[in-house]
Image (spheres, grey):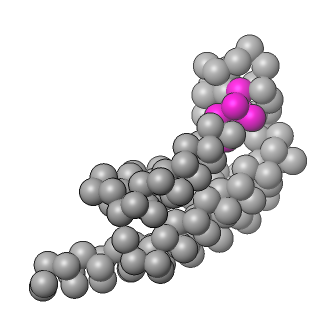
Amino acid sequence: MPNKINNLFFLLIIAHCIHATEEYFGKLWDVYRPAIFICNLISSDPKTGFYIINTAFIVVSLLFWKFALQKRSPAAYSFIWLWISLQTVNVLGHLAWTIYSKTYRPGVISSLLISVIVILLIKELSMHSSKSNLA
């Protein structure tokens, strides 16, 4: 796995931490219906559910980054594309919600950071894929 992809994936994890922090201070679990639903599936206290979901997401991603990416696991690319898909849906949800509401919504600012990193990561993955197909 090229270092640039490793670094971008790590930056995506950091961006998600920033994003979860913005959502936390905006009490996303109280104001966004999908978050309310998902957080209540995890815990009877949606704030706790939010914390559990994001902590698990970050821990799993860091473990993946540390072990699968560093050891160049064959499944690494699939996991990265899954992460890209999840983050893209997340960004689009925040943007749509904000546009629909015509006001700031928790998570929208940091979702822009996530979108930039996702675009750079897609570019690097595509370049790496085309190089490996040529070899």
Extreme residue in the left direction: 134
Residue 44: give x, y in percent of width and height: 74, 14
**Residue 51 located within the stretch drawn in magenta:** yes
Image height of 109 relative to 32, above or below? below
Figure check: 81 above or below 56 = below
Q: Quadrant of residue 103?
A: bottom right
Q: Which quadrant holds the C terminus?
A: bottom left
Image quadrant of residue 17?
A: bottom right
Residue shown at 62% from the left, 44% from the top: 59
Left or right side of 55 for 23: right
Q: Is residue 6 above or below residue 54?
A: below
Residue 63: x and y, percent? 55, 48
At x 46% / y 78%, what residue is drawn?
3
Query: How many dots with numbers?
Result: 0
Q: Residue furthest right?
A: 25
Q: Residue furthest top?
A: 44
x, y (%) of residue 47? 80, 29
* Quadrant location of the N terminus in the rendered image: bottom left
Where residue 77 sits: x, y (%)?
33, 60
Question: In terms of secondary structure, what is the magenta stretch mainly?
Answer: helix
Q: Is residue 3 above or below residue 39?
A: below
Q: In the depicted view, which residue is nearer to us: 50 or 33?
A: 50
For residue 64, side relative to residue 94 (left or right): left
Q: Is 65 within the magenta?
A: no
- Front residue of this view, candidates 103 and 105: 105
Residue positioned 65% across, 57% down in the render: 16
Side of 41 relative to 70 (left or right): right
The answer to whether one can see residue 85 in this image is no
Q: Is residue 29 visible?
A: yes
Q: What residue is rendered at 53% in x and 73% in y? A: 8
Specify start and end residues of the magenta stretch as a single range. Answer: 49-54
